[in-house]
Amino acid sequence: MKASDPRMYIAPGWFYDVTQKYGLYLLGALGGRSYEAFAEDIVKSASLSKGDAVLDAGCGTGYLFPALAKTIGKMGRIEGVDFSRAHVKAAERRIAKMGLVNARARVGRVEDIADEYPADGFNAVFCSAVLPVLKDAGLAMRGMVRVLKPGGRLVIWTISRESLATTRFKCYWDWSIRKFDLKFYTQTELREMYLEAGLNDPVFGATGLSLICVGSRIA
Ligand SMILES: C[S@@+](CC[C@H](N)C(=O)[O-])C[C@H]1O[C@@H](n2cnc3c(N)ncnc32)[C@H](O)[C@@H]1O
């Protein structure tokens, strides 16, 4: 089954959390950082302030929510969208457990963001571990840029294609690319996608196999 098919994500949220947390760590994708510490790195890269509004595109089980809530505080706003009902339910449980009154997760497609959220509404949009599974990443990125305020940041966390060429788990990645129809991008391709979507030249941070890519919307 292809990773762009919602039926790939029907397992309960806890199952996803365990595989993401330990699987990515063991595969070296997080450069030895824990899953939670890595989430903090992703959120920090957006240079957010208290009271900011953020959108987590393909939020999954709300992996970024604790770091986001800590950074933007009670006056901020967290919106999460994901096409997996199981993941959205897990994100809602996380929101309830943390007692967040300024966060919500809902079922929707990343590709429809521009139609479902007002333009110029967010200080940052996060797209963490989602780009490789999208059929049309360029379309999704243009939508994410549209809902950013001028100067707002698009933060993408993804595994880079360059790093996959050198990993000792290359066989696993080659297999999963074929099996799930994943697409990993080079740094040059990501830069072009940022520029085409109407963002400034992005800044890259590399850890393990991963790239955290940050660019701001041209005012
Ligand atoms: C690898 S998980 C990453 C989840 C989360 N962002 C994280 O970092 O833990 C990919 C997520 O993207 C969601 N997803 C994949 N394609 C999507 C799409 N077209 N629209 C909305 N969600 C999508 C899946 O349901 C899954 O929760």
Image: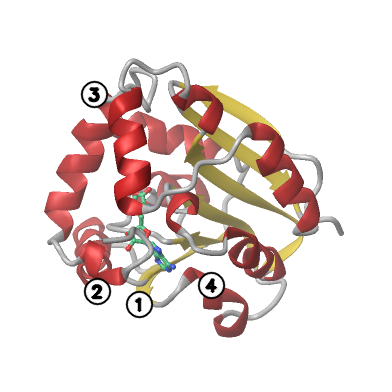
Dot in front, 2 or 4: 4
User: Residue at 28% across / 25% down in the picture?
Assistant: 27
Secondary structure beneath disc 1? strand
Q: For mark 4, what is the residue?
A: 111
Query: Could you tell me residue 22's position as x and y percent?
Result: 19, 32
**Quick check: is the Cβ at mark 4 less than 8 Å away from ligand 1?**
yes
Dot in front, 1 or 4: 4
The residue closer to the viewer here, 103 or 84, is 84
Label whose residue precedes the other's in the sequence (3 or 2) = 3
Q: For mark 3, what is the residue?
A: 26
The residue closer to the viewer here, 96 or 145, is 145
Secondary structure beneath disc 2? helix
Query: Could you tell me residue 149's position as x and y percent?
Result: 73, 64
Label whose residue precedes the other's in the sequence (2 or 4) = 2
Which residue sits furthest bottom? 115
Tag of residue 183: none
| Position of 130 relative to 43 (above/below) | below
Tag of residue 85: 2
Callout 4 environment at 10 Å: few (<14), some (14 to 19), or many (20+)? many
Q: Amino acid at mark 1?
A: Val
Mark 4 to mark 3 CA distance (whole Å)? 31 Å
Q: For mark 1, what is the residue?
A: 107
